[in-house]
Each structure stands twice: as structure tokens, then as C-alpha cells.
Image (cartoon, rainbow, N blue to C red):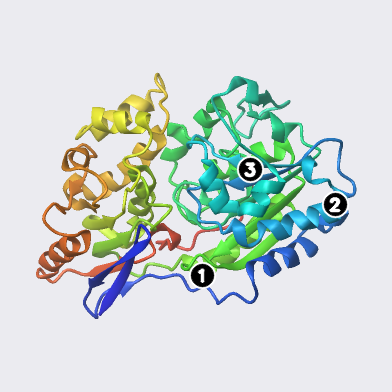
């Protein structure tokens, strides 16, 4: 039989044996348009009054709507206009609305990307700004400390807002349990210093920092505490199927709406692993998630519950925008083949580097499989780049990624090995045991 791995804006059709285990999400078809689902959620939120009613009691200042950046495939162009009309219907003038892009430490958006993400009408009507974590003038320190006792500095436009709305996509997340909700604020709007604790070595070394796990997860708890400290007036979380359609929209109080969306995703996209496999074949999520190697790491880590220790993972990602940030690429190449040394270095805490957390999570795959068994196929990076990334490149110089993967997989399967396939990559995250969605401290 065939499987279709998401790869860039295309798919890779790979022939797999009938005996293979295939893990896929099981979302329902959309019950209505994205705009209708979102508006219905805004009218019937969890834990707080409807959006129009809540806005009637807003403080003096802008209505700031926090939106995700280009690395998330949220179809804002299908519903954001309807959401903004709900805001203006409450008496808010368009010039009082600010769309704040929660970039975290990602690069800023381009005008073309904004038009593609939000649509021409929204771009024409609303002010739009990117968060800049390294711009001192864009940050304000909050009174109080995070759950872990750290100082918190966030985007000043968000802190000073008269009404704060966060939006996000809820999906399994390889370190925070699930994305969405509180992550729009932390890491989305945080300073570099605040991110040092959120993405620090100790947090990510915790075994509870894993997909579909929120109880006891320090990344989740820290992000939630930061968002609560800042104060979120209204939250909207959406869930997408593998065709990037909105199938669920949940609005309301920050934590209540997020937990409801997480429970839905967990029931639909976190299948339980009955037995580990010798080989896992996985996508890295397709565009926009696989546009850099940095993002592709999510697919390599999310699949780990399905593979045996010492087994083999074959992952595929387009890497159409290269390795990632200059800092990340330099770090990866500096420590080529020396990933254990890198982990020891950051464990000491003497030197914190941008994007070190992604290499640390990459280390989880290396620790379970070994570098020779972490195989990666792409036509977006040069052989020299691939050989510097502490893994085993799948050679695509004389064939397409599809053919190269097929050849490697067929060779491995001739040894009668068991196979699991995750065509959607990290959008479907198999779990080894039933993870709790809620727990103490939430």
C-alpha cells in the first residue's frame, strides 16, 4: 500500500507493506466555515462573557489581538476578518485595533507574508506589528515573578493594551505538551531573558516536557504563569485537520479554553502506541512547518514513542529556507558529531545561546537512536550542510527525496523489521502511555 508524507507544499508517495502501522489523526470534517466556527465560539466562550460583552468593559488603550507567525499554518485569512468585525461591532474603532505577531525569537514577517496570512482587507484596515524579543524599547517588565521565580518582560504593546486577545493553533507540541493558549504570550511575546528560563536546559531535561503531557510539564506551567501574570482578557484556540481546515474553535478564559481544545486534540491526534517499532517513517509536517531544519526537529522528536531504542527513524522535510537562524546553524556546525559535549556545555548554564533548545531536543532522538539511525531526507540543503547536522543524511543527489527514501526503506525492510508510519509528522503525536491533559498547578 502507499502512504503520502507531507513534504513542503507537496507529498511524497512511499510504498509500504500492508503490515505497517500507520498513525494518523482522526479529525471530523468541518461542520461549518472557519469564520462561522470562530464567530460561534466568540458568542459562546468558556468561563467568561461573549466577546462583544467583554469588550464593553475594556480598559483604556488599544485592543491587541495576538496572532501567530508564518511558521504556523493557521488560515487567518478565512476567519480573522469576521473576528475583527465582532470587535468593531462592540464599538471599537479600527484604528484602536493592533495585530501583534507573536514571533518569539523567529524572524519578522514580510509584507507579502502578512497579506497571505491575514488577507488584503485585514492588512488594509489594521495596524500590524511583529514582536521583537531583542528590542529593549519594545519590552516592559511585569510586577511579580513567573512560576519558576523568574523576572518577566513582555512586549510593551501587549502589556499596555486596554484589552488583550490571544489566538493560537492547538496541536501536539514536542516540549510544551500542546501548542496554543498561553504560548502566544510565552514564548510568543517574551524577551530573550524570559525565554532563557522557558527554554532552559533544566526545563527541557524534565521527562514531562513532551508531547501531549501537561501535568507537571515545566514548559507548560512556566508559560501559563507568565500569561496569567500579564493578564489575558480573551482567548481563541483553533484546531486544524491535515488539510489545514478549521475543525474546532474554542474561545473564552485563557486556561479553560485551551484545556478544552487540548482534550479534543488529544482524543483525535495522539494515538496510543501498543508496541515500539524497529523503524519509523515520518514527515516533518510539510509547509510551513518543514521550511527549516530547525522546525523539522519537531517531527524527529515527536515520533520517538513509536520507535525502539536503537531503532531507525527516517524523516523528511523540505528545508526550503535552509537550516534555520544564523545562530542555530553556527551552533549545529560547531558541534557536529559532538552532541553529548554540547549537552554538557549547556547543562553548566555558563553560556546560553539562541535556539539551543532545539539542539537539546534533537539530542533526545540521538540518545535513543544514535546518529547513524537518525536518517533525514531533503533536497533543500547541500550535502555539506547535512553532514554537519549530527544525523545520517539520506543521499538525494542522484534521485528525488521520494526515491531515496523508498530505496533506504526497502533495504531496511528486507531484514523483516517492523514499521510505523506518521504521514502528518508532528501534527499526529503517538504517545507511549495515556498522558494527563490537566493536573496540579494548572
Mark 2 vs mark 3, CA separation in Å: 21 Å
Image coordinates for residue 11, horizontal then vertical, percent: 32, 66
Q: Quadrant of residue 287?
A: bottom left
- The answer to whether residue 16 is above or below residue 78 is below
Q: Are marks 1 and 3 in contact (CB under 8 Å)?
A: no
Where 373 falls versus 82 (above or below)? above
Label 3 CA crowd tier, 10 Å (few <14, some 14–19, many 20+): many
Whichever of callouts 1 and 2 sits on the residue coming sooner in the sequence is 2
Point out residue 120 in the picture as x, y percentages from the top left corner: 62, 53
Q: Quadrant of residue 35?
A: bottom right
Q: Which mark is residue 224?
A: 3
> Which quadrant of the figure contains the N terminus?
bottom left
Question: Can residue 65 be seen in this snapshot?
Answer: yes
Report the Cα–Cα distance between label 1 and label 2.
31 Å
- Cα–Cα span, label 1 and label 3: 24 Å
Secondary structure beneath label 3: helix
Q: Secondary structure at mark 1?
A: helix
Q: Residue at x 41, y 39 (%)?
A: 205
Residue topped by disc 1: 268
Foreground mark, 2 or 3, reads 2
Mark 1 or 2: in front is 2
272 relative position to 228: left or right: left
Label 2, secondary structure: give it.
helix
User: Dividing the picture into quarters, in which one does residue 412 lie?
Assistant: bottom left
Q: Measuring 26% from the left and 74% from the top, which residue is drawn there?
A: 20
* Residue 295 % position (x, y): 39, 46
Amino acid at each position: 500500500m502507499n502512504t503520502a508524507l507531507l513534504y513542503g507544499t507537496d507529498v511524497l508517495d512511499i510504498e509500504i507493506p500492508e503490515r505497517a502501522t500507520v498513525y494518523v489523526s482522526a479529525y471530523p470534517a468541518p461542520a461549518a466555515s472557519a469564520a462561522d466556527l470562530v464567530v460561534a465560539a466568540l458568542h459562546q466562550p468558556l468561563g467568561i462573557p461573549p466577546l462583544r460583552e467583554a469588550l464593553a468593559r475594556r480598559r483604556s488603550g488599544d485592543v491587541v489581538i495576538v496572532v501567530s507567525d508564518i511558521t504556523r499554518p493557521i488560515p487567518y485569512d478565512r476567519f480573522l476578518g469576521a473576528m475583527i468585525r465582532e470587535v468593531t461591532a462592540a464599538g471599537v474603532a479600527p484604528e484602536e485595533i493592533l495585530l501583534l505577531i507573536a514571533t518569539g525569537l523567529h524572524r519578522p514577517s514580510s509584507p507579502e507574508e502578512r497579506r497571505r496570512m491575514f488577507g488584503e482587507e485585514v492588512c488594509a484596515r489594521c495596524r500590524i506589528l511583529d514582536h521583537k524579543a531583542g528590542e529593549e524599547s519594545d519590552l516592559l517588565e511585569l510586577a511579580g515573578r513567573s512560576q519558576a521565580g523568574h523576572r518577566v518582560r513582555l512586549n510593551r504593546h501587549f502589556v499596555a493594551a486596554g484589552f488583550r486577545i490571544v489566538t493560537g493553533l492547538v496541536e501536539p507540541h514536542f516540549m510544551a505538551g500542546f501548542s496554543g493558549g498561553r504560548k502566544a504570550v510565552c514564548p510568543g511575546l517574551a524577551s530573550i531573558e524570559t525565554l532563557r528560563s522557558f527554554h532552559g536546559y533544566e526545563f527541557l531535561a524534565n521527562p514531562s516536557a513532551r508531547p501531549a503531557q501537561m501535568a507537571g510539564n515545566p514548559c507548560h506551567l512556566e508559560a501559563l504563569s507568565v500569561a496569567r501574570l500579564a493578564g489575558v482578557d480573551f482567548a481563541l484556540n483553533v484546531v486544524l485537520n491535515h488539510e489545514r481546515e478549521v475543525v474546532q474553535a474554542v474561545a473564552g478564559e485563557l486556561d479553560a479554553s485551551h484545556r478544552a481544545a487540548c482534550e479534543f486534540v488529544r482524543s483525535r491526534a495522539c494515538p496510543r502506541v501498543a508496541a515500539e517499532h524497529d523503524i519509523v517513517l515520518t514527515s516533518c509536517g510539510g509547509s510551513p512547518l518543514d521550511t527549516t531544519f530547525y522546525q523539522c526537529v519537531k517531527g524527529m522528536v515527536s515520533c520517538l514513542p513509536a520507535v525502539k531504542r536503537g531503532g531507525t527513524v527516517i524523516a523528511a522535510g523540505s528545508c526550503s529556507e535552509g537550516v534555520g537562524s544564523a545562530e542555530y546553524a553556527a551552533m549545529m556546525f560547531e558541534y557536529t558529531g559532538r552532541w553529548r559535549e554540547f549537552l554538557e556545555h549547556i547543562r553548566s548554564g555558563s553560556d546560553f545561546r539562541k535556539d539551543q533548545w532545539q539542539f537539546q531536543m534533537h539530542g533526545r532522538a540521538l540518545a535513543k537512536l544514535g546518529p547513524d539511525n537518525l536518517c533525514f531526507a531533503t533536497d533543500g540543503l547541500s550535502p555539506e550542510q547535512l553532514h554537519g547536522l549530527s544525523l545520517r543524511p539520506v543521499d538525494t543527489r542522484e534521485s528525488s527525496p521520494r526515491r531515496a527514501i523508498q530505496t533506504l526503506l526497502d533495504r531496511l525492510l528486507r531484514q523483516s523489521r517492523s514499521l510505523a508510519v506518521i504521514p502528518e509528522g508532528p501534527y499526529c503525536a503517538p504517545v507511549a502511555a495515556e498522558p494527563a491533559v490537566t493536573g496540579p498547578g494548572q
